[in-house]
Image: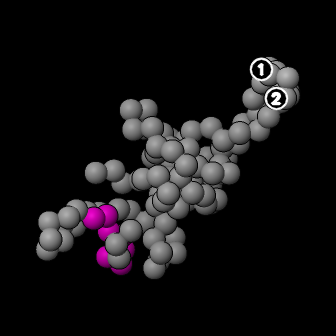
Amino acid sequence: MARIKKGDTVEVITGKDKGRRGKVIRVYPQNQRVLVQGINIVKKHMRQRRQDMPGGIIEMEAPIHISNVMPVCNRCGRGVRVGFKILEDGTKVRVCKKCGETI
């Protein structure tokens, strides 16, 4: 089970976007990277592919290493470490190490 999943709100803990928060768009488990909305913006030179798609320099998000982000707990309101707990019905859930709230 992954500590960070698609749709989670995460906080960047190091790098040029330190302290900023965003929503996880995509997770790349093989590369240990995540794509976060509005974080790690890079400029990419794009060639015109079709008549209606203009070329030029566009800004887009680039993946960031998974160790540089922390999930944000809803109750604590800040980046927290993640633990795991098995409920009575046998399902495994992620919990906040600080307050014990299910993430």
Residue 54 spot, x, y in % from top left: 85, 28
Q: Tell me if label 2 and label 1 are in contact, CB under 8 Å.
A: yes
Queried whether the magenta region covers residue 81, the answer comes back as no
Q: Is residue 98 magenta?
A: yes
Q: How is the image coloured?
A: one colour
Pointer 1 residue: 49
Q: Quadrant of residue 47?
A: top right
> Tag 2's secondary structure?
loop
Mark 1 neighbour density, 10 Å: few (under 14) some (14–19) many (20 or more): few
* Image coords of residue 50 (percent x, y): 80, 22
User: Is residue 52 placed above or below 7 in the rendered structure?
Assistant: above
Q: Locate residue 78 relative to residue 21 in the image: left or right.
A: left
Task: State which region is magenta.
Answer: 93-100
Identify the residue position indicated by label 2 in the image. Answer: 53
Residues packed near mark 2 inside 10 Å, few (<14), some (14 to 19) or many (20 plus): few
Residue shown at 66%/41% (left/top)?
61
